[in-house]
Image (cartoon, helix red, strand yellow):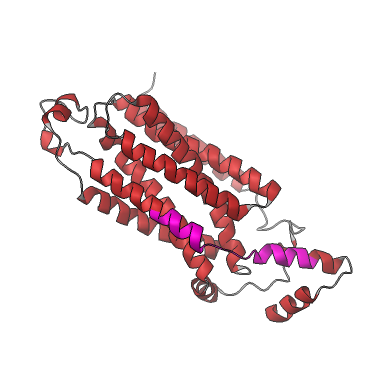
Amino acid sequence: MCDAIKCRTGLCGGLSAVTVFFALFVTRSKPPTPVAASRDSEIEVPPFWEGVKTCFRSKTYWVLAICLGGGVGLFNALYNNLQPSLCVMGYSPSFDGGMGTLLIMSGLVGAAISGLYVDKTGEFEKTMKISFLLAGIAACSLAISINYEGMEGWVVASIFLFGAFGFAIYPIGLEMGVEATFPVAEATSTGLIIMIGQIQGVVYVILTNVFVGKPDPHQLAIQTCVDKNSNLKTVVTWSVPFLIWAGCVCLLIILFVILFWPKYKRREYEANRTKTENGIVLPEAIEQEKTRL
C-alpha cells in the first residue's frame, strides 16, 4: 500500500500525462468544414484590443458581465465560506466537506442539463432568467438554514438547488456574451466575463469575512471547527455574512431580469447567411454584410 499523498499525486500526474499524450495528436486549430456559418473563415474577426473595446461599448455585455461575473463570484464566495459556517453550528467535518462536493457536482449536472435544453430550444434568455431566479430562492433558503443546527436535509436541498440552478446559467451566459458581441472572438468575450467574475469573487469573500460575528456559549460548545483545547478565538458565526451574500444574489437577479434584453447577433447572421445561400437574399442580410465590410 502506497502513502495516500503519493497515491493521489501519482493519480493526478497520470491523468495529466494521458491528456498531454492525446494532445500531441491534435494537428489543426479548427475543423476542415465550419460547424456553422458564423465560424466561416470569411468573417473578419477584429483584433484583440478592438474586440475589448467592442465588448465594453455594449450595454448588454456590461449587464451580462456584471451579473454573470457576480454570480460566479458569489458561487466562489459560498464555496470559500461554506465549511466554517457549517462547523460553527455543530455539523461534522465529513458533512462540511460533502456539502462542498455537492455544490460542485450539482453545478455540473445543472450546467449539462441547461446546455442541452438551450441547444434544442434556443431559449437562452428565458432559461438564464428562470435559473437565476430559482438560484436566488435557494440562496435565501440557505442563508436561513445555515443558522440552525441539525438541519442537514434543509442544508443539503438548499445547496443542491443553488449549485444546480446557479451554475446552470454559466455556460448559457458565456454563449450569450458571444452572441451580444459577435463577431468579436469568443476567447475575448468569455475571458473578460471570467476575469470580472474572479475580481468580484475576491470582493465578495472580503465583504462577507468583514461581518463575521462572535459565537455564543452554546455554539462554542457544539462547534466542530477546532479542538476544544485549541484557540476558540478563531471560531466565528456567519449569520450576517450569509444575509449579505443572499442580498447580493437577489440584487444581481433584479438587475439582470430588468436590464438584460440581448440581441442574438450571431444567430441572426447564421440565419441570414443560410437564406442567402439558398437563394433568398433578405434586406437584413444585405445591410448586415455592408456593415461588416
The stretch in magenta equals: 251-273
Count the labels in the image: 0
Q: Which residue is drawn at 50% across and 57% down?
A: 257
Residue at 58% in and 59% down = 176
Give yes or no for residue 256 being in the magenta stretch.
yes
Q: Which residue lies furthest to the right in this view?
A: 279
Q: Can residue 149 be seen in this view?
A: yes
Image quadrant where residue 151 sits: top left
Using the image, determine if residue 117 lies above or below residue 34.
above
The quadrant of the picture occupied by the N terminus is top left
Q: In the rendering, at what x and y percent does residue 147 appear?
A: 27, 34
Which quadrant, please, contains the C terminus?
A: bottom right
Would you say residue 130 sits in the magenta stretch? no
> Viewer-proximal residue, 266 or 253?
253
- Considering depth in this image, is 32 or 126 the residue closer to the camera? 126
Query: Residue 178: percent from the left, percent from the top?
Result: 59, 62
Q: Which of 281 and 14 is in front in this view?
A: 281
Query: In the drawing, does residue 93 fall left or right of residue 64?
Result: left
Residue 85 in which image quadrant:
top left
Image height check: is 141 above or below 176? Answer: above
Q: Is the magenta stretch mostly helix, strand or loop?
A: helix
Q: Is residue 40 left or right of residue 4?
A: right
Q: Which residue is drawn at 20% across and 51% down?
A: 210
Residue 27 spot, x, y in % from top left: 67, 54
Identify the residue at image location x=84%, y=73%.
Answer: 281
Q: Is residue 13 visible?
A: no
167 lies left or right of 3: right
